[in-house]
Amino acid sequence: MYQTIAMTSEVRERLPEVHVLAVKLKLKPLNEAPSSILFEEDWHRLHQQWKNSTKSDVANQEKLMAYQQFYRDQLGLNVKKTPPSVQNLIQRYLIKDTLERLPVIHPIVDAVNVAAVSHLIPLGVFDAQCVEGEVQLALSHGGEEFQPLGSSTLESLPPHMLILTDEMKVLSQFCYRDCEAQKITENTQEVWLLGCQVSGISAQTVEAALEEAQFQLKRIYSISNS
C-alpha cells in the first residue's frame, strides 16, 4: 500500500492533479556486497528496445509527453535542456548503436532506474535515515539553502519553486534535482521510493512502476515495509 506525500495548501491549489505516491522500505543485502553487475543484462535488453531511435522518437512517447508538460507548465523548465529523468537516461545511453557505457550508479539506484525506464515513469529513491521528520511538497519562500547532488557548494533557492522538504531541509527541487544530503550510499539501509502522478498518468500506472522497482530491488535485497 502506498501513501501519498503531503502537500501544503498552496501546492494543492496550484497542482490539483499531481500526487506523489511513496513507500518506505527497509533493505537487507542478500549478499555481502550487492553489485550493479546484476543489472547489466537489463540495460542490454533496454538498449535493444531503444537503439537506433531518435531523440524525437523518445520525446514523443505518450507517457513522457505528460511529464514534459508537467515540467514545462508547472515547473517552468525548458524540457529540451532538462527533460524528465527517464527520457534523459534513454536519450543519453540507450539510443546509440552500441551501449558504450552502462548507466550504473549504485545497486539501489540502478534497480529503480531499470524499473523507471521499463515503465517510462520517473521514480525517485533516497536514504530515509537522512530524513528528519515528515516529508511534504511545498513552494519555496526564497533563500532556502540547497546542496545539489554531486555538488560541494550550497545554493540559495528563489521563491515559488516546487520543493520536496522534510522538517529541517530541502530534499529536492522536485522531480528533477535531488539534494546531496539524502543520497544513496553504501551505508543505506532504509529508503523512500517515490513516483509522481501527473495529468494524463493514472495512479495505477505509477503503482505498476513502483511495484517493478520493488521487484528489481528484491533481486539483491530482502525488503520489508518500514
Image (cartoon, helix red, strand yellow):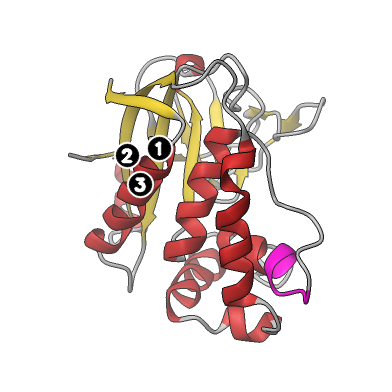
- Which residue shows up at 60% across the image and 79% down it? 58
Q: Which residues are magenta?
A: 91-97
Packing grade of label 2 (10 A; few <14, some 14-19, many >=20) is many
Using the numbered discs, state the Cα–Cα distance from disc 2 to disc 3 in whole angstroms: 21 Å
Compare residues 215 and 105 and report the one nearer the observer.
215
> In the image, what residue occupies the spot 63% across and 45% down?
177
In magenta stretch: residue 96: yes
Q: Is residue 143 in view?
A: yes
Inspect the image, locate mark 2, and give the three-letter code of the amino acid beneath it.
Answer: Ala
- Of helix, strand and loop, which one carries label 1? strand
Residue 170 horizontal/vertical position (percent):
55, 29
For label 2, the SS is: strand
Q: Residue at x 71, y 33 (%)?
A: 156
Which quadrant holds the N terminus? top left
Residue on which disc 2 sits: 22
How crowded pointer 3 is (Cα within 10 Å; few <14, some 14-19, many 20+) is rated as few
Q: Residue furthest left?
A: 1
